[in-house]
């Protein structure tokens, strides 16, 4: 594949991949909040939360993992780029991420 074709394909696919990823994370977050509110016996607050009505937010339990891109030795932690993801304990799905 020629370099020019790769960049063209990448420019067309990247927005769709990002859109799909963001939609998946948003759906997983909604599911995680629902399950947590259900545990707290506050299912009625879920609809309010979806409609941006002020309700006490659920305290979510998450697992967090991050990594840094490093090409030299395993002893240095000075990379300028990295990533982090949050995984909901109830759903075991990614509910947030950050790229640095």
Image: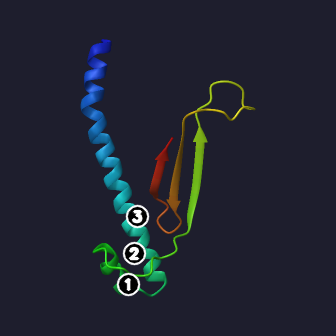
Q: Secondary structure at mark 2?
A: helix
Q: Is residue 10 left or right of residue 33?
A: left
Quarter assignment of residue 62: bottom right
Residue 74 location (% of width, % of height): 72, 31
Labelled disc at residue 43: 1
Q: In this rendered view, identify the residue nearer to me: 34 or 49.
A: 49
Furthest-top residue in this view: 2
Marks 2 and 1, Cα distance to the nearest angstrom? 7 Å
- The disc, 3 or 1, on the residue closer to the chain's N-terminal end is 3
What residue sits 62% from the left and 25% below the top? Answer: 71
Give whichever of discs 3 and 2 has the lower sequence position: 3
* Residue 1 in view: no
Of marks 2 and 1, which one's residue comes earlier in the chain? 2
Q: Are marks 3 and 1 in contact (CB under 8 Å)?
A: no
Residue at image x 39%, y 75%?
34
Looking at the rendered structure, the number of numbered marks drawn on it comes to 3
Dot 3 crowding, Cα within 10 Å, few <14, some 14–19, many 20+: many
**Alpha carbon of mark 3 to alpha carbon of mark 2: how far?**
9 Å
Q: Does 78 sit above or below residue 93? A: above
How far apart marks 3 and 1 lie (CA) works out to: 15 Å
Residue 13 sits above or below residue 35 on the image: above
In this figure, which residue is indicated by the disc labeled 3?
A: 29
Q: Which residue is mark 2?
A: 34
- Residue at (24% x, 31% y) in the render: 12
Q: Position of residue 18 (x, y in %)?
A: 33, 43
Q: Which mark is residue 1?
A: none
The percent position of residue 79, horizontal first and vertical second, equals 61, 32
Q: Residues within 10 Å of mark 2 (few under 14, many from 20)?
A: many
Q: Are the two marked residues, 2 and 1, in contact with CB atoms closer than 8 angstroms?
A: yes
């Amino acid at each position: 594949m020629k370099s020019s074709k790769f960049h063209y394909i990448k420019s067309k696919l990247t927005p769709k991949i990002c859109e799909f990823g963001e939609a998946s994370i948003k759906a997983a977050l909604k599911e995680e909040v629902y399950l947590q509110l259900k545990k707290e016996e506050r299912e009625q607050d879920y609809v309010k939360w979806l409609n941006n009505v002020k309700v006490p937010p659920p305290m979510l339990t998450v697992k967090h993992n991050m990594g840094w891109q490093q090409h030299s030795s395993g002893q240095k932690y000075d990379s300028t780029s990295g990533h982090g993801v949050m995984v909901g304990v109830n759903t075991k799905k990614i509910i947030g991420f950050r790229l640095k």
